[in-house]
Amino acid sequence: MSGFVYILECADGSLYVGSTRNVEHRVNQHMSGKGSRYTRSRLPVRLVYQREFPHIGEAHAAERRLHGWSHAKRRALVEGRMDLLPGLAMKGGQRRLVIDP
């Protein structure tokens, strides 16, 4: 069964990364304050990125990779600035990860 990785922009400008089988349902959960502790205190949220994967496990793996990305690198992904991804520093500056668009 397919899955999605998604990014929400919170009211404070932060970016929340998650994965799910049903993006619309999951975003509605976040908007109602039942999605996560993090987004609950940063409402409203707005879906700014989603990508489908053939299997939910792949979406979970992509989510874990994105959690390691800096805010700047996540923002570049959201804005479709794939050319910037390789040059942006990772959290801690230790590794560079690429997620195919």
Image: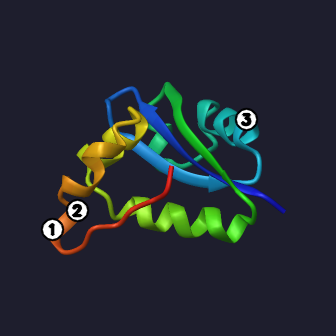
**Number of numbered discs visible in the structure rendering:** 3
What residue is shown with label 2? Answer: 90
The residue lying at 64 percent from left, 31 percent from top is 32
Crowd rating for badge 2 (residues with CA inside 10 Å; few <14, some 14–19, many 20+): some
> Circles 1 and 3: CB distance less than 8 Å?
no
From this view, report whether residue 84 is shown above or below residue 44.
Answer: below
Q: Nearer the viewer, residue 70 or 37?
A: 70
Q: Secondary structure at mark 3?
A: helix
- Spatial distance from mark 2 to mark 1, Cα to Cα? 5 Å
Q: Residue at x 39, y 43 (%)?
A: 77
Q: Earlier in the sequence, mark 2 or mark 3?
A: 3
Give the residue number, with chain letter if any, for mark 1. 93
* Marks 2,1: beta carbons within 8 A: yes
Q: Give the mark toward the camera: 2 or 3.
A: 2
Q: Give above or below for 61 relative to 82.
A: below
Residue 89 placement, left or right of 19:
left
